[in-house]
């Protein structure tokens, strides 16, 4: 009998809220693109209600465009590595192997780094200070809701090889 690729309906937690027996994924059900999307949309909504614009500056627009291009480059490289390793991208699916090549040589979370660059780049290009301000809680949400769960899962799944990788490669940059 084959196991389902995501056993979300079998989620069980112990008394401390830690995931136990039967689950083979990071237990993340609110994906980081949605977290940043909600952040950007909230910034746009707040800007509509209470305008908070950045100074008009072509330099800020160029920096924003550079961040958008960087986000695309990082994400493309990370997606190639996911495809090469045949690991799923969604954090609520079990992975098959530890990824340490490609952009994962420089950051343990290249897709989250790309999302942060995309979020900041959009805020700069749009001249919207709210979008930039909301980047901070978005990053905190990703860090403490997503990354903590993923790191616990990867430690359970791969043990010492993941701990060694974690000691060698930074979480962000």
Image (spheres, helix red, strand yellow):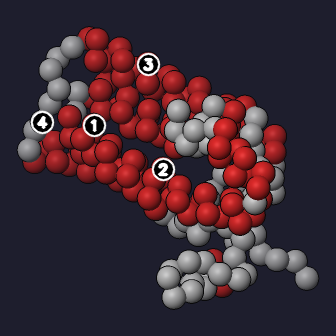
Which quadrant of the structure image shows residue 133?
A: top left
Residue drawn at (76%, 35%) of the image: 101
Residue 51 screen position, x and y as percent: 10, 38
Q: Mark 4 vs mark 3: which is more N-terminal?
A: 4
Please state which of residues 100 and 134 is positioned toward the viewer in this rendering.
100
Residue 22 screen position, x and y as percent: 73, 81
Label 3 residue SS: helix
User: What is the distance, in whole Å, between disc 2 and disc 4 at their CAs?
Assistant: 24 Å
Which quadrant of the structure image shows residue 65?
A: top left
Few, some or many residues within 10 Å of mark 2 (<14, 14–19, 20+):
some
Look at mark 4 in the image and give the residue it sits on: 52
Q: In this view, does 35 lie above or below 149?
A: above
Residue 80 screen position, x and y as percent: 73, 36
Image side of residue 100 versus residue 112, left or right: right
The disc at residue 132 is 1
Q: In this view, does 97 lie above or below 173?
A: below
The disc at residue 66 is 3
Residue 92 visible in the picture: no
User: What is the distance, in whole Å, between disc 3 and disc 1 at their CAs?
Assistant: 15 Å
User: What is the distance, in whole Å, between disc 1 and disc 2 at their CAs?
Assistant: 16 Å
Look at mark 2 in the image and give the residue it sits on: 33
Residue drawn at (65%, 64%) of the image: 153
Q: Mark 1 vs mark 2: which is more N-terminal?
A: 2
Residue 166 screen position, x and y as percent: 65, 46
User: What is the distance, in whole Å, between disc 4 and disc 3 at their CAs?
Assistant: 22 Å
């Amino acid at each position: 009998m084959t196991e389902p690729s995501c056993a979300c309906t079998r989620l069980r937690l112990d008394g401390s809220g830690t995931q136990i027996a039967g689950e083979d994924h990071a237990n993340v059900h609110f994906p980081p693109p949605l977290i940043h999307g909600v952040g950007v949309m909230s910034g746009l909504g707040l800007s509509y209600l209470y305008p908070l614009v950045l100074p008009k500056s072509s330099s800020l627009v160029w920096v924003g465009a550079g961040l958008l291009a960087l986000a695309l480059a990082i994400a493309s490289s990370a997606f190639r590595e996911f495809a090469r390793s045949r690991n799923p991208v969604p954090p609520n699916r079990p992975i098959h192997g530890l990824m340490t090549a490609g952009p994962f040589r420089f950051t343990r979370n290249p897709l989250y780094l790309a999302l942060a660059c995309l979020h900041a780049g959009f805020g700069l290009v749009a001249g919207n200070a709210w979008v930039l301000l909301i980047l901070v809680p978005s990053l905190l949400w990703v860090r403490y809701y997503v990354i903590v769960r993923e790191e616990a899962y990867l430690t359970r799944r791969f043990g010492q090889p993941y701990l060694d990788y974690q000691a060698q490669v930074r979480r962000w940059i």
